[in-house]
Image (cartoon, rainbow, N blue to C red):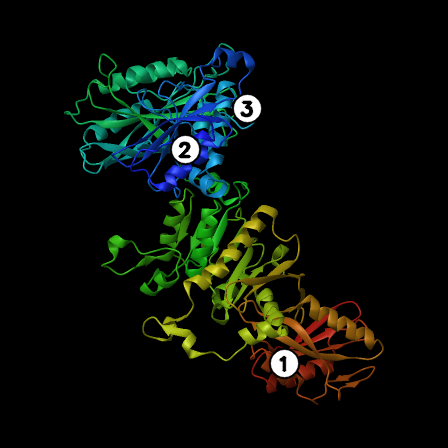
Amino acid sequence: MSNIESKQFCFPKGINSEIQRGITLITSHPSVNEILEVRLNTEDNSVDAVVAVQLGLPNKWMAEGKSPNGVSAIEAVTFSFPQSFPIHAPIVKLRADFDRSLAHVNPGSPEEAVLPCIYDGDINELLLFQGLLAIVDQIVLWLEKAAMNQLIDPNQGWEPVRRDNLENIIVADSDYLRDLVYGKKNYFLLVFGYLKVKKPNSSKHFIYGQVNSFLLKVKDLDILFREMIGEKSSYGRSLTVIIPPDKLPNGEFKIADKYLPENVTDVGSLRERAKEFGCNKNFERAFSLLQQRLKWLDSKNATFPIAVILCVRRPFHLIGESSEIELVPYILEVGAPQLLAKDDKTPVWRAIHKYAITPKLLQKFSGEQQLPENKDIVLVGCGSVGSKIAMHMARSGIAPSIVIDNKNLSPHNAARHALLPEAINKDSTWFGSKARALALAINGLGQDSSYFDADVTQAVHDSKLLKKLFPRKAWAVINTTASLAVREALAAIEPKKLPLRVIETSLFAEGKVGLMTVEGSGRNPNSVDLIAQAYEVMRASEQLRNAVFVAEDSTSYYATGQGCGSRTMIISDARISMLAAPMATGISKMLAKGLPSKSGCILLGAVDENEMGLGWKSIDVPPFHVVPINNDSSWTVRISEPAHQKILKDCANYPNVETGGILVGRIFQTQQAFVVTDVLPAPENSQRSRFEFVLGTSGNMLEKYLSSCNGVLYCLGTWHSHPTDSGASNQDLQTAKKIANSRTLPSVLLIRTPVTYYAVSASIS
C-alpha cells in the first residue's frame, strides 16, 4: 500500500478519530511503506498499528534482506496508541525475536515484543514539541544504527544494561563501590539495609535497600547472619556482596565488551552471567564463603535478601560517567543453612541501581563545582534564615559541617522554618533542639554535620568552647542569628584566636531588604564595622532609607508567648526564601572562587515594587583604619575608608591651619570601639587658625543626619587636624574632660596629623 493509498485504509470499529489521524500521519513518513495491521486491544482499549519500515542499509544487505546481525531491511514496527493520545505518545515495539543483545533495549521476556529505547528523554515531550513524525524519525534512526552496530557511541559512552521499570531497588554510592573495585581484595562485604514492600492485592513483595559504606570483615558475618535469620519484620539488615572483575596475568581487569540482555532469573544464570562479565573467579570465591558461614545456621524457613553487585569492566566509560566500571545489581532471597539449591534454581531478582545521596551527586544536579574536602563551614543560628541557607547549601552538596543554636523549636517556627514537623508527631508540639534537627536533616542528605546547643557569646571568655565550636581548619563562619550580642561577641574575639572570617546575614523592613556582609582579610573590616557601614549605605539611598529607617511598627511583630523576649518579626516563608536563596548562592560562589582577597564586602538586596523580584548590589569595603586611644587603652577608633578620605580632603583644603568636623557612626561596647562611618563638615561659623580649631554650632546639619537614619547612626565626637605631627595637646585633653562631663555617651576626639592619627577618649583623661 502506498503512502497515498494508506489514507483510504479502513480502520476497525472502536478506534477514535485522533488515533486514526495519528496512524494516517505515520504512513506519510518517507520510510513507512504500508500499514500491515491495525487492531484494537479490548483489555485497555489501546490500538496497535503495525507498519512496514524501509531502512537505508548498504546495497549488499538490502539484497540479502537483512544486516549481519539480523536487522531486516524492512522491519515491522508496532506503534501502540493509548486512548489518551495525543497527550501520551504511542509505545514503539519491535518483533519478539529481535536481537535483545543490542544496546538501548529495555528488559523483557523472550515471549514479549522488544521495546527499544529510541529517545534520550521523555517521549511524551518529544511528541508534544516536535510531533508524531519525530518519533518515527527516532525509530528509523535507531533501527539503522542497530543494523550497523552503532547503537553504542564511544564518544557518548557505554550504554549500561537496561533495567527500566524493575521493582527492586538498590541504593548505593557508586563512587565508593568503584573505589573498592580497585582495592586488593577479591570481594567486599557491606551491610545492606532493606525494606520489604508488599505489592497491592498480592502476597508478593519487592525490596528497597541501601548499601552501607562500611566494610565488614569475615568474622563479622556470624553476628550479622544471626541477626538476619532472627529478623521477622519487613525491614532489617542483611549483606551486600561486591564482586570486582577478575584480573588478567598483567594485573589488568578483564574487559566485557559484549552487550548482553538482562535475562538472569536464578543463581545458575547469575553464575553464567558472572562468567560472561569476567567476574567468574571472584564470584565463586564469594559464594563459597557465604555457604561455609551459613551452613551451621537455621533460619527456620524464614528468608532474607542478600544483595549481589557485579562490577563489570567496560571498554570505555559509561554514559554520563567518567568510569569504565558498570555496577549490575541483583537480589537473592535465601535462607539458612542452605544458601543455594543444589540445582542452582534459587530465584534471583533483577534490581535497579539508584545513586545514593552524596555531596557529589547533589553538586552534579545542582550545577555546583566539586569543592575540596577542607571547605568546612560553621553556621551559627538555625532559625528561619539559617535553616533555609543551610538546606539550600546542603541540597547543593556543600552543607555546613557544624551548626550551632542554643534555642529549641517552637510551634510558630513552622510558619517559615526550612524543616517541617513530622506528621507522626502532629498530636504533640513541635519541640527540640534547632541545631540537632537541622544537623539530622543535613545528615539525611548524605553529609556529615555536627551540632552544638551552645551559646556562642560564652566563647569570648572560654577558649575550650571556642576551639570546639570554631575549628581553625574551617573555611568561614556564617552568622544568621540577627543577634547583636552574637555579632559583637564574634567581633570581640581576636583574629589570632578566631581567624575564621564571618559572613553575616540580616533582614530589614519586614523582609523587604536583605543584607549580607563578608569580613575582610585578617577580619578587618569585621562584622560590626560592616553593619555600621551598611547603615551608612542604606541611609544614603532614598529607596533603602525609606524602607529601613522608619519608626518601629508594633504590628510587624507578634508575641509567640508571654514576655517581651517572645516577640518575632512578621514575615512570610516565601519572602524569607526569596532572600535566603540568593544569600546561599552568594556563599556558594565564594566557596568556589574564594573570599575577597583583602577587603570586606556588603551585599544589599531590595524587593522590587511588585514584590516578585530582588535587585542586589555589591559594595567593596576596604580595611578600616584602627587608631588606639591614648596609646594605652583597650578602646580603639575604627575609621572607614570613605570617612578617612573626607578627612584627608579637608586637611588638603586647609594645609596651614587646623580644621575639623563631626564624627558619626556607632559605638560597640563589647569590642570597645568607636566605628566611624562618615564625617560631617564643620558648620559655617567654625573658626580655623594655626594653633586652634573651634567647631561652630550654626545650622541643624547633625539633627538632619540623625533623623535620616532614625538615630541608628549618631555623633561619636569630633576630629581636628594638627599641621605638624604632634599628638594631643593640653588643650585637647581639657576639651575631652569638658565633653565627658556634658555627654552620657562615650565620645572621642580624633586628631589627624600629616602622617597619622591620634585619639583621646572623652571618658578617659
Q: Residue 221 location, x and y as percent?
A: 28, 25
Q: Which mark is residue 14?
A: none
Sequence-first tag of 2 and 1: 2
- How busy is the neighbourhood of tag 1: few (under 14 within 10 Å), some, or many (20 plus)? some
Name the residue beneath numbered marker 1: 705
Contact flag, marks 1 and 3 (Cβ < 8 Å): no
Residue at disc 3, secondary structure: loop
Q: Is residue 667 above or below residue 436?
A: below
Q: Percent from the top left, x then y, of residue 381?
A: 44, 59
CA–CA distance between discs 1 and 3?
70 Å
Q: Marks 3 and 2, Cα distance to the nearest angstrom?
A: 45 Å
Residue flagged by tag 2: what amino acid is it?
Answer: Gln
Label 2 neighbour load within 10 Å: few <14, some 14-19, many 20+ = few
Report the quarter where the N terminus lies. top left
- What residue is pinned by disc 2? 8
Does 23 appear above or below 376?
A: above
Give the camera-side residue of 642 and 89.
89
User: In the picture provided, is 98 more to the left or to the right than 605?
Assistant: left
The disc placed on residue 154 is: 3
Q: Is residue 521 above or below residue 648?
A: above
Q: Amino acid at mark 1?
A: Tyr
